[in-house]
Amino acid sequence: MKKGPNAPLPFHPLRHAMAPSRYPLSLAAICRKFVMSRNGGAPNNSSDFRSTLPRFTPEALKANQAPVDLLGRIAAEKNASPAQIALAWLLAQKPWIVPIPGTTKLERLDENIGALAVELTTDDLREIDSAAAQITVHGNRYPEKLEQLTGR
């Protein structure tokens, strides 16, 4: 893999550890929205890994809702999904940022590819950036034992 300032930046939508802090927006917020709408709150299945993550507690989900709502509003204006807006935002940052969204479903792959057709205006980008700069993420990323394994 090419290294240096022009190298592609690995980015996983649910794990933004590799993204610089100036790119705080990730698709984790979209995932949280899905979990909330599907289950009416935090993951309620003990086999769901997210049920162990502090950011998926009902309190953290509620506190982290503002950026999800913003992406949802912009998505409605653009006739796109919130995930497409998040991917389009990432693509608009730098030409060497390459989002790598994970999925096991063909319809989600099609949705992700659709982000290439989303055109965000300068005002859209400014609004998302402004909202992202004000985000204070609630809830730790991992439970303490797992966080110790990350080397951070």
Image (cartoon, rainbow, N blue to C red):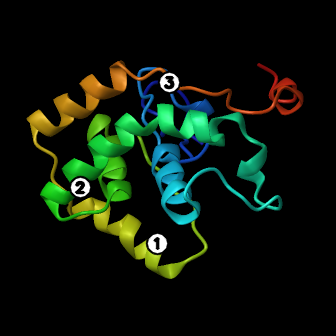
- In this rendering, which labeled residue sits more in front, label 3 or label 2? 2
Q: Nearer the viewer, residue 66 or 21?
A: 66
The circle on residue 20 is 3
Please give the residue where the numbered disc 2 appears in the rendered image.
75
**Measured from the top left, where is residue 42 in percent x and y?**
63, 50
Q: Nearer the viewer, residue 119 or 46?
A: 46
- The N terminus lies in quadrant: top right
Identify the amino acid type marked 1.
Arg
**Measured from the top left, where is residue 72 in percent x and y?**
29, 51
Question: For mark 1, does the 10 Å Cα neighbourhood hold few (<14), some (14 to 19), or many (20 or more) residues?
Answer: some
Label 2 vs label 1: CA separation? 16 Å
| Residue drawn at point x = 62 percent, y = 31 percent | 17
Label 3 vs label 1: CA separation? 26 Å
- In this rendering, which labeled residue sits more in front, label 3 or label 1? 1
User: Element at badge 3?
Assistant: loop
Question: For mark 3, does the 10 Å Cα neighbourhood hold few (<14), some (14 to 19), or many (20 or more) residues?
Answer: few
Please give the residue where the numbered disc 1 appears in the rendered image.
108
| Residue drawn at point x = 29 percent, y = 27 percent | 131
**Left or right of 110: which side holds 9?**
right
